[in-house]
Amino acid sequence: MSSTPASVRFLTGITTSGTPHLGNYVGSIRPSVRASLTPGVQSFYFLADYHALIKIDEPARIQRSTLEIAASWLAAGLDPERVVFYRQSDVPEIPELTWLLTCVTGKGVLNRAHAYKASVDKNTAAGVDPDSDVTAGLFMYPVLMGADILMFNAHHVPVGRDQVQHIEMARDMANSFNHRYGEHFVPPQAAIEESVATLPGLDGRKMSKSYDNTIPLFANREQLKKLIAGIVTDSRAPGEPKETEGSALFQIYQAFATPSETDALRKDYADGIAWGVAKQILLERIDQEIAPMRARYQHLMDHPEEVEAFLLAGAQKARAIATPFMARLRHAVGLRGLTTGVVQAKVKSVKSALPSFKQYREKDGKFYFKLADAKGVVLLQSLGLESPQLAGKSIGLLQKEGAAALEALAAQLEPMADRDAVFAALDALKDAAG
Ligand code: TRP
């Protein structure tokens, strides 16, 4: 097995290509902030700014959107102490992993990705070259997304239906990498939010930037009032009973209201509420939820240095995981320092030259173990443990799982000087045992 994290890991990203709207809030920001409060869950939230480059070539817009989305998440209650909250482009291991995954991903698999296929179908229908205006970035999108997920061995990735195919592709990448190089990745699962309905926009179609029918999440009350006034309704007069079915206004209300509030509005509809009155009720309900966050959002927008500091601290947490994991992956595929390879070849041929574990007790009464190479050079050193059984268990895990056990045991092992040498020694032991 690969690393055995103590908790379940959730991970989700938002592409930094626009201003967050109520649809993003209801569909992604609000549920993910709630999920981050669940005990036993370790959450990763990031700003997918590398992904934004696929769609957008306006640098100022990407920067602005990064600030707006980060500020929205924070204003909505995301606690950066509790979660790992970072900007994708602050973690250089992610594009590095993208290349390793690119090399285990079938081109045919990417040919079938929905977003790429849609472009090809459109071009074909228009009678132009199938790849006209398709960048390699769009084609490679699923691999970058796979690297986002596999970098942190996320178990669950909460996404909308349109992203499920990408998660399946990430599973395939994990499996083909593991098949070639040993168990390093946890195949992730999509966590589809069935309960989270997609929010209709002002015109009744799905709220989306591309339809230009959105309500910005942090519109001020006046703007909010104006936008709500523009939600399409039918022409029924006050006093005439109204249908809740297919009413964008009703559906938006439902996404914010409690079940009993929703029932009350349903009854008002049947009783022939005037559209103007219904819109006023909707305005108040949204404002009740968003107003308390607005001040925090405005503060963060006015102090980008605070947001920047949160993101840099988050990147540090992310890299504390990504850097050693990437070192392990580099070793696994053969991107290694040249000296350790030679050492390993010798180790394999002479059994007595194998590295070995030593267990001992110190004057402090604690139990220790270390891994030393054939010459006695210490490669791994444990901290003081409470019992010899604990030390024995850790050694057993290292012998059985090799480098894959290092992450789970990180808390009881001293940082090692030369990772390549440690990996090579553990590989040699595993090979000798198997
Ligand atoms: N592709 C996602 C979207 O457009 C954003 C994203 C990038 C993402 N990397 C991810 C989501 C990893 C979940 C996990 O919505």
Image (spheres, grey):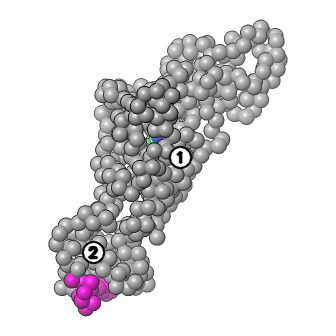
Which comes sooner in the sequence, label 1 or label 2?
1
Based on the picture, tell me whether residue 359 belongs to the magenta stretch: yes
Pointer 1 and pointer 2: residues touching (CB < 8 Å)? no
**Location of residue 404 with respect to 18 vertically, above or below:** below
**Which residue carries the number 2 mark?**
424
- Closer to us: 134 or 284: 134
Q: Amino acid at mark 1?
A: Gln
Q: Amino acid at mark 2?
A: Ala
Q: Residue at x 27, y 74 (%)?
A: 424
Q: Residue at x 28, y 78 (%)?
A: 425
Front disc: 1 or 2: 1
Which segment did they paint magenta?
Answer: 346-360
Q: Which element carries disc 2, helix, strand or loop?
A: helix
* Neighbourhood count class around disc 1 (C-alpha, 10 Å): few under 14, some 14–19, many 20 upward: some
Q: Percent x, y for residue 261?
A: 73, 29
Judge left or right: residue 19 versus residue 91: right
